[in-house]
Structures are given as structure tokens and as C-alpha cells.
Image: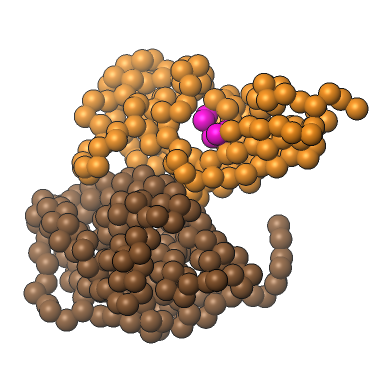
Chain colours: A orange, B brown
Amino acid sequence: MRAPPTRDEVLEILADVKDPEIPVISVVELGIVRDVSVSDGGAVVTITPTYSGCPAMREIEADISRALQERGIAPVEVRTVYSPAWTTDWISEEAREKLAAYGIAPPGRAQASELITLSRRSSPIPCPFCHSIETERKSEFGSTACKAIWFCRSCRQPFEEFKAL
Amino acid sequence: MSDPALVSYLLRLGDDRLVLGHRLSEWCGHGPILEEDIALTNMALDLIGEAALLLKLAGEQEGQGRDEDALAYLRDATEFRNALMLELPKGDFGFTIVRQFLFSVFSLLQMEAVQRSRLEALSGIAAKTVKEARYHVRHCAQWVITLGDGTEESRARVQAAVDDLWRYTGELFMADDVDCEIAAVGIGVDPSTLAEAWQAQVGEVFIRAGLTVPKTGYMQRGGREGKHTEHLGHMLAEMQIVARSHPGATW
């Protein structure tokens, strides 16, 4: 028998549960863990999806349950909420640096504006490899729903950007 | 107790996105360039994800034990409530992009309003949809302008798409008893109130693209009552065959 877990302990375990598509940042750093509560040796983790069709959500749910159960926490319940909607503004500063080091340009600030603009960003984003701003967006959509494809004209490398949402 | 108007309304919202999402998914592996193949399937994923949430909620409100999979895979064409425009075959890339643009502008305006729904579960889904629709509008508007203001060939193709699709746009804004009832209780939006803003936004992009809107008064309708074109049945046959042939299968 182990002592009932504390909320901090659960959060610490979750800090090791990585996003399956971006294995350098955790589900906590990504901002999809919205709440944790503990009672009677078990835990309830509330998460929210990045995109409504994100195919990684079920895997993330299973990863969270497994990680907590491996540490003797039971029962584990993972709840999904949709409101408030996830925003890239919840990604921590530390996680942004990890994204850049991994080769994914971190997101800019999400725009609260209701206006539809035809061009999303007026200034180019810096290349995560060589930091040049001689970059161009190739596509609004990338290998996963949350990323866009860019190309750096200086180092001739394609790279991904975590889209502001 | 279940509210039939609310269930109908949620089915409309969900079916619009499920049917269009499936049409978009038909591009998987067939996009004109790799980036666009990825973009079309990403948008399909967004729409199918939104549909799953909306149909799940519809099933919960209905209270007859049908989940989102049962509603997607085990209903026949006459039980679908999507607008007719969304079930038409995917056509060429120009047709797909014009339809996607027309619907995305509608979806954005609709969900911006539904975000204020007093049904909390629905307002949460709407807030997510708004964020996704914004990307879809931007992406499609850029393509409409690129193709409309492009070569003779590309201009002719997107103009033909606009001409073919226009008679289906009216249905998006036709309000019936279901819409009015749901709008009156603060859960949904009366679609007729969105028409003016939609025309302004679509018109602005069409001007930049050099495209013209056909002068026709006639508008097709029927999808909201389950009266569909022949195309929906064919599409569902493909979409539903695995689920119907192997009931309860998991993988």
C-alpha cells in the first residue's frame, strides 16, 4: 500500500507524459491538462483537446491512465472538457524553448480578433535552425493539425511551426 | 426528456460537417500537390472531429442510447440532415475549394453565434469550431483568389464551380420551425440572420478573385428534411460499409 497521492505528486507524474506527436513536451506543458483532483488514493485528470479531431487524444488519455496506475494510483479517471477552448497561449515559456530546440517554431500570440484576415501573419517567423527571418510559409497545414509548413531560404530547410490558435 | 427540435438542430450541425468532412477525405492521396493533400485531409479531420462532438451531443440529447458512431454509420440517407451542397461529389480541385470556402465562411459565422449558446456543451464545441473554421476560411480564400486570378484554365474552372454551387447556397440560410424554436430559446442561431454577413465576406473575396455570382433566384432545398440528391446514398454506402459489415468491430 502506498500513501494517497497528493495533487502535486500527480502533476509531477504527468510532467513525464509526453505528447505522442511532439515527444519533447509534456501534456502539462502543452496546456491540455486543465485540472487534477485527488481522493481516496485515486485521481481525476481533466484534459481538453488541441483540435477537435486530434487523433492523439485517445492515446494521451491511455498514456495518462497508464502512467498514474504504474505509480499505484487507482482509480484513475480522465475527463475531457471542450470549454474553455484550448489555446496555444497556454503553452509554457519553457515548452516554447523546447519546441524551438526540437526544430518546431513556437506559436506567436493567439489573436483574439474576430476579423478574418487573408494573410495570417505580416512578418515572417524566424527559422528554428539558423534563426534567419528569410522564411516563407508553404502551407497553413502540416503533418499534424496543429502545425504549418515553412521553408527557410537561408539554410534551405523546411521546418514546422506550431500554429497560434 | 428529449427535445425533438434540439436533436434535429444538433443533427443538422453534425451532419453538415460529417458529410463535408467525408467528401474532403476522398482527396487523401489525390491532392494536386503534397502540401494541399495534407491541407485537405487536415480540414477533413477538423470537420469529422467537430461532427463527432456534435453527434455525440445529439445522441445524448436524444436519449435512445445512440452514440456518435451509431448516428454516423447506422442511419440511412433519408435520416441525414445535412445541406445538399455538402453531399455533392468532390469534383475537381476548384470545385472542392469553392465549396469549402462557401461553407467555411458560413460555419465561422454560424459558430461565432452558437458560441453564445446557453447549452454549455454546445457553446464549448462552437468555440473550438470557430478557431478551426478561421484557418479553413483563410486557406480557401487564398486559393479562390489564386485560382480565380490565375490562368485562363483555373479561372474557368472555379467560375464553373461557383455557377454550379450557387443554387445550393440558399439552403444554408433557410430557417424553418426547428431553427426558429432553437434560436428563440437561446441555444442556436437563426441561419437567415447570417446571410448578409456571408454575402459580404464571400463577395469581397470573389471581387479579388475576379469571379461573378450567377443571377439566379432559384435555390435548391430539401437536405434539412432528409430529401437528398442521389449522391448522398452512394457516399454513405462507401462511408458506412465497414461499420455495417462488421458490427461492433474494434481496432
Majority SS type along the magenta span: loop
Which residue appears at 36% of the width and 67% of the height?
Answer: B182
Q: Is residue A43 left or right of residue B40?
A: right
Q: Of all residues shown, which one is farthest toward the right? A: A1
Q: Position of residue B59 (x, y in %)?
A: 55, 67
Q: Quadrant of residue B226?
A: bottom left
Q: Quadrant of residue B169?
A: bottom left
Q: Is residue A13 left or right of residue B241?
A: right
Q: Is residue A125 above or below residue B124?
A: above
Q: Position of residue B18 (x, y in %)?
A: 46, 64
Residue B219 is one of the magenta-drawn residues: no
Residue B20 visible from this viewpoint: no
State which region is magenta.
A30-34
Residue B3 visible from this viewpoint: yes
Which residue appears at 39% of the width and 72% of the height?
Answer: B82
Q: Position of residue A19 (x, y in %)?
A: 59, 33
Q: Is residue A64 left or right of residue B11?
A: right
Q: Quadrant of residue B251?
A: bottom right
Which residue appears at 71% of the width and 32% of the height?
Answer: A38
Q: Quadrant of the N terminus of chain B?
A: bottom right
Q: Position of residue B2 (x, y in %)?
A: 53, 71
Total residue callouts? 0
Q: Is residue A58 above or below residue B171?
A: above
Which residue appears at 29% of the width and 30% of the height?
Answer: A136
